[in-house]
Amino acid sequence: MPQKQNIHVLVTGGAGFIGSHSVDALLEEGFDVRVLDNLTSGAIENLPQHEPRLEFVEGDITDGPTVYQAMQDISHCLHLAAQVSVTRSIEDPKYSGTQNIIGCVNVFQQARLRRLRKVVYASSAAVYGNPSTLPVEERTPLAPLSPYELEKQVNEQYAALFSAQFGLSLLGLRYFNVYGPRQDPKSPYAGVISKFTDCLTRSEAPTVFGDGTQTRDFVYVKDVARANLAALLSNHDGVCNVATGTEVNLLELLRILSIALDVHVDPKQAGARIGDILESRADVTRQLDWLDFVPQWALADGLRAYIVEALECGLPAVSTACVGGPREILADGKFGRLVPVNDPVALAKAMENALSVPADREALKARAQFFSIDRSVDQYLKVLLPDDLNGPSA
Ligand SMILES: NC(=O)c1ccc[n+]([C@@H]2O[C@H](COP(=O)([O-])OP(=O)(O)OC[C@H]3O[C@@H](n4cnc5c(N)ncnc54)[C@H](O)[C@@H]3O)[C@@H](O)[C@H]2O)c1
């Protein structure tokens, strides 16, 4: 593994979901980072503010001079920028191809001109289509089902050519289903976890396409960020799965989420979607060999952390004894109670229940100040509690 010094990383798409977590991980490891992003689906708020080792450049990966300029003094590139919607790629393949093929080739070409030491780029498990055997190994024949998936396959072919003919070191990562904070549930293309969570927190029925027995290999975004880091520092070229090597079906996922959120609604059933992958689980042998990477987040833990972070972004929560902070709320279903967003009646009811137990009421009053998740509790304390309980610290 190469030394970490003199590494300056360009992250394309760094203001997006996977990108911003990767930026966090790179900064934590002490690297200097530059982000190139056109903010079409990413947001500047996803990035740490006032971080001297982070530089943001607004620009487009399809523009040669922009990318060449952004690669000045850069040693490594993590290329994540893409048009990420399968649906859009079907509706507008020309646009999608321009972003995902021309943009990617441009990044490879500028990296070649700048003589970068390594480019790690985002491929996708979608390149496998509907695999006939599980777990899916990297050598499984590819069978993309949409323009987006084909574009990722073409990226891999360009990468192989740039490695073989021009000596550029390129490693493509086939991410399986990535989930976690900062994945925008409002996007029609958001992952199933953020969509289910969004529905449940509103006590709305999520839609399950097909019979719900489709399986996915869900990998937590903070693990993906670690895999990206390991890939940047690895000496391998080629393609590598990034996944947990375990699968869960969508009905089971919904069950876990319902328990975690304490919201139980029957899902709406809809017909299976064309091209929907039935089963997915990665072979993670190469991930271990090449990246020395083992995911740290089991699905239940990842979901819990994800929900907690989603709550911190504004969903109200009621808790009575969470001394350790937000993470305890879901860990301890006895004291913690989550309330759907925009539902003041449910919140008031939950508060009332909590406040009816004197010990809980005291605990709440004493502890609400300690964790940010109870900003909303602070607010409701002012409304619901008599003055004598509504002291300066509550
Ligand atoms: N999220 C997943 O489950 C998943 C799975 C497999 C592969 N991937 C791949 O991982 C990468 C990151 O995906 P994500 O989920 O973080 O998506 P995202 O939409 O959150 O991030 C993409 C980022 O790229 C930026 N961008 C888009 N087009 C650009 C352009 N022309 N120039 C500059 N910036 C541009 C967007 O503004 C955004 O910040 C993508 O290449 C995606 O195809 C994601």
Image (spheres, grey):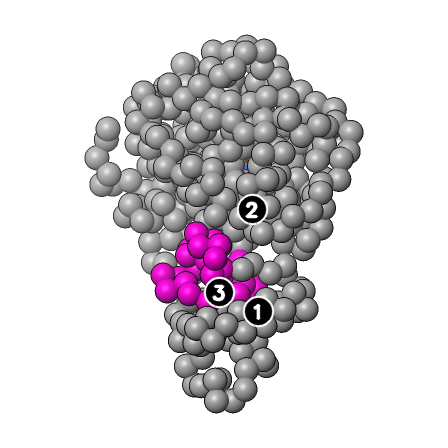
Residue at (30, 27) in percent of width and height: 292
Q: Which residue is mark 2?
A: 259
Front residue of 186/57: it is 186
Could you tell which of marks 3 and 1 lies nearer the N-terminus? 3
Name the element at disc 2. Answer: helix
Identity of the amino acid at label 1?
A: Asn
Gap between marks 2 and 1, in whole Å? 20 Å
Of labels 3 and 1, the one closer to you: 1
Tell me the residue that label 1 is attached to.
Answer: 353
Quadrant holding the N terminus: top left
Residue 97 quadrant? top right
Mark 1 surroundings within 10 Å by alpha-carbon count, few (fewer than 14), some (14 through 19), many (20 or more): few
Q: Which residues are magenta?
A: 311-336
Which residue is identified by label 3?
319
Mark 2 residue type: Ile
Q: Amino acid at mark 3?
A: Ser
